[in-house]
Amino acid sequence: MKSPLAPGVRFLTSFSRDSWYRGSILLLTFLFYTSYHLSRKPISIVKSQLHRNCSELIPPAGLNISDNETWCDWVPFDQSNYKTLFGILDNCFLVAYAIGMFFSGIFGERLPLRYYLSFGMLMSGLFTCLFGLGYYWEIHSLLFYAFIQVMNGLMQTTGWPAVVACVGNWFGKGKRGFIMGVWNSHTSVGNILGSLIAGVYVSSAWGMSFIVPGLIIAATGVICFFFLVEKPEDVNCSPPQHHSETEPLLQNLRSNEGMINGSVTTESAEVIEEHAEAISFVGALCIPGVVEFSLCLLFAKLVSYTFLYWLPLYISNVVHFDAKDAGDLSTLFDVGGIVGGILAGLVSDYTGGRATTCCVMLLFAAPMLFLYNYIGHRSLGTTIGMLLLCGGLVNGPYALITTAVSADLGTHESLRGNSRALSTVTAIIDGTGSIGAALGPLFAGLISPSGWNNVFYMLISADILACLFLSRLVFKEVQGWCRSCVPQSRGFREF
C-alpha cells in the first residue's frame, strides 16, 4: 500500500511556481529596504552620545576638567549650537536624498533594477562605514561628516523606486493595500533593528553603531545581485493583471503563435515593449492624484522623519534616559508604525478609499501628538502607549502613500499598461515627500532651543496641512460612494 504524501510536502506543493516566486520577491525586497533604513537610523541614536551632560559623568583618572565643561563631547559637537550642527548633518543627508530621488526614478526605469539596487546598497554600506570610521580615525571635522551624509543620501535614493517598481511588476491591484501594508513594515523593522544595533555600541564605541549596519546593507547588496528577479517574464511566470486593457493583449499573445515553450517570442515582446516606453516627468505629474498625494506626503513625511531623527534625543532630554535606553524606547514608535501601515492597507482595500483612509488617520494623529507632548512622559506606561498610538497614526498614511498609492498611480489605467512608469511616479511622490523629510529635522533643530512645545506645534500644523491637500480626492471618493451602492471602489478612475 502506497503511503500518503507527508503533510509538510503536501503543504509545500500546494503553492504554484508563480506563488513561490512572488513570495521570494516580497521577502527579498523586504530584506533590501529593511537594510536601507537600518543603515540610516544610527545617526539619531548617536546624537545623544556626541553631546552629553558631562557634569553627570565621572572623568577619567588624571584628566583636568576644571576649565573643560565639555570634556566628554565629540568635537565639533561640543559647542552650545550642537543642535544646529546635528540639524546640518540631518539635512545634508535628507536634501541630497530629496534631490537625488527625482533623478533616481528616471535611472530606475532605464537601468536593470538588479544592478541598480546592488550598486546602491554596496555604496550605502561604504559611506555608512566611513562615518563610523571617523570615530577610530579621530576625525573632528564637520565637513567630513557632512560630505559622508551627502553621499550616503544620494546612494540611498536607489532603494525605494527600485523596490516598489519590482513589487509592482509582480503584484496586481487585488489586495495591494494589505500586501504592501505588511510589506512596508520593512521601514519600521529597519528603524527598530538599526536602533537596537546602534544602541549596543553607542556607549562604548559609537563608530561600530555605523560600521555594523554598513556591513549589513553591503551584504544584502550582494544577495540582491545573485537572487533578484525583476519581472515575472524573466522566469516565464504569468504577469499580474494591472488593467483590463493589458490582460487581453497578453492572453492573445499566449494563445497564438507568440508563445513557444511558455515564453513570449521576440515579435510578441516587441509588441509589448511598444507600450512600455519610459514616461516623462511632466507626463507622470499629469496622472490624476499624483500632485495631491505628493504634497500630502511632503507634510506627512515631515512629521515622520522629525520623529525618526529627533525622538531619541527628545526622550533623553525630557525623560532623562541614557542614550541606549532612549534609543530602545524610541523603537516603540516604529512598532506602532507597523500596525498602522497594515491597518491602513486593510481599510483602504476594503473601502477603496486610499485618500479617505489617509485623511482620517492624519486627523486623529494631530490631537495625539499634542497629548503625547503634554502627558506622554508622566509614566513609563503612558509613554509606551502614546508612542505606539502616535507611531501608528503618523506612519500609517505615510506607509500607504509610499506603497499602495504609488503602485496604483504608477499602473493607472491612463498609462495603458505602461508599468515602466511606476519607478518615475514612485520617485516623484517619494521625492516630494523627501523635501518634507529634509525640512522637518531642520526645523526641529532650529526650533528646539526655544522649547520642545514649539516643535510639536510645528508637527501638528504639518499634519493638518497634509489633510488639506487630500480634501479634493476625499470629496471625490465620498461622492463616488454616495452615487453607487456597489461596495467595490472605482479606484483612481474618478480622480
Image: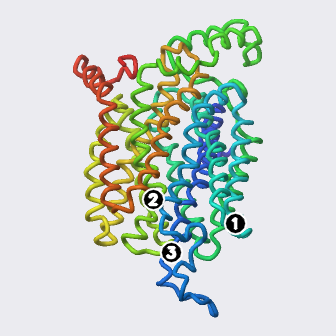
Q: Earlier in the sequence, mark 3 or mark 2?
A: 3
- Quarter of the image where the C terminus is located: top left
Look at label 2 and name its amino acid.
Answer: Trp
Q: Looking at the rendering, which quadrant does residue 136 occupy?
A: bottom right
**Vertical position of residue 491 compared to residue 91: above or below:** above
Q: Percent position (x, y) of residue 398?
A: 43, 42
Q: Observer-nearest residue: 421 or 107?
A: 107
Q: Is residue 230 visible?
A: yes
Question: Which residue carries the number 2 mark?
Answer: 310
Q: Observer-nearest residue: 422 or 282?
A: 282
Look at label 3 and name its amino acid.
Answer: Arg
**Vertical position of residue 252 compared to residue 57: above or below:** above
Question: Which residue carries the number 3 mark?
Answer: 52
Q: Percent position (x, y) of residue 369?
A: 30, 54
Q: Residues within 10 Å of mark 1 (few under 14, many from 20)?
A: some
Q: Earlier in the sequence, mark 1 or mark 3?
A: 3
Q: Are marks 1 and 2 in contact (CB under 8 Å)?
A: no
Look at label 1 and name its amino acid.
Answer: Ile
Camera-nearest label, 1 or 2: 1
**Residue drawn at x 59%, y 67% as measured from the top left:** 76
Q: Earlier in the sequence, mark 1 or mark 2?
A: 1
**Residue drawn at x 53%, y 64% as measured from the top left:** 45
Q: CA distance from mark 3 to mark 2?
A: 15 Å
Camera-nearest label, 1 or 3: 1
Question: Which residue carries the number 1 mark?
Answer: 139
Q: Looking at the rendering, which quadrant does residue 463 occupy?
A: top left
As helix, strand or loop, the secondary structure at mark 3 comes to loop
Q: Observer-nearest residue: 173 or 32?
A: 32
**Vertical position of residue 39 compared to residue 435: above or below:** below
